[in-house]
Amino acid sequence: MDQIPARQVRAAYDDDTIIVYQAYASAIAEPAVTAQAFVPPFKIERMTWIKPSFLWMMYRCGWATKPDQERVLAIQLDRQFFDRCLTNATLSHYDRDIYASQVQWSRRKKQTHVRVQWDPERDLQLNPLPWRSIQIGIGGPHVRDYALTATRSVTDITGTVRKVRQLVVDGELTSAQSLLPSENPYDLPPEAAAAVGASVA
């Protein structure tokens, strides 16, 4: 574990798609599952945040217990769209190791519609780990593509989330671990890796 790069995208994926997670109230989740796309009342005018890490999603939504985050969705997303978003992303906060100056960072923020944050990854008990997990905010014209064309499928995994949470509460961590999705290092195109400041493995 001590060899995991500090900023590495890890996800469940295949040749064409990558799984990301979101949590919503039933009013948004139910129509999305039915339509297999994000339809109203989902708002394409607002930035939407996706997370490839299952456990970071659990941290964010409190195992589907937080208000308006009671339904956890696994979204099968087109990899070309995912890579394109990261290539056109800007970090939410200035990082002197990535940007030559705050002026350059500010200028890029104005020119792009995707935001990236690297937050501590979480373990089964939602404790922070030494390495980071990526969170991606999709905004502007990319939201419509995300909602209607880049999304291949939308699956409600709330039942699994509750089952894993109960196993953790009961101290059955090995059984809980066995139900987690298999997330492996995801190779970003060089332009995307540079844009988001991903670590070189």
Image (cartoon, rainbow, N blue to C red):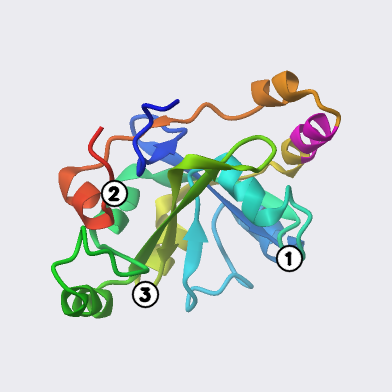
Going by the numbered disc 2, the residue's amino acid type is Asp
Element type where label 2 sits in the image: helix
The correct choice, above or below, for 67 with respect to 162 in the image is: below
In this figure, which residue is indicated by the disc labeled 3?
Answer: 140
Instruction: Please tell me which residue lies in front, 23 or 92.
Output: 92
Report the magenta residues as a range. Answer: 162-169
The residue sitting at 71% across, 57% down in the picture is 30
In this figure, which residue is indicated by the disc labeled 1?
Answer: 68
Going by the numbered disc 1, the residue's amino acid type is Asp
Circle on res. 83: 2
The residue sitting at 73% across, 40% down in the picture is 161
Q: Main secondary structure of the magenta part?
A: helix
Q: Position of residue 105 (x, y in %)?
A: 22, 73
Q: Is residue 168 magenta?
A: yes
Residue depth check, mark 3 versus mark 1: number of the one nearer the observer: 1
Q: Residues within 10 Å of mark 3 (few under 14, many from 20)?
A: some
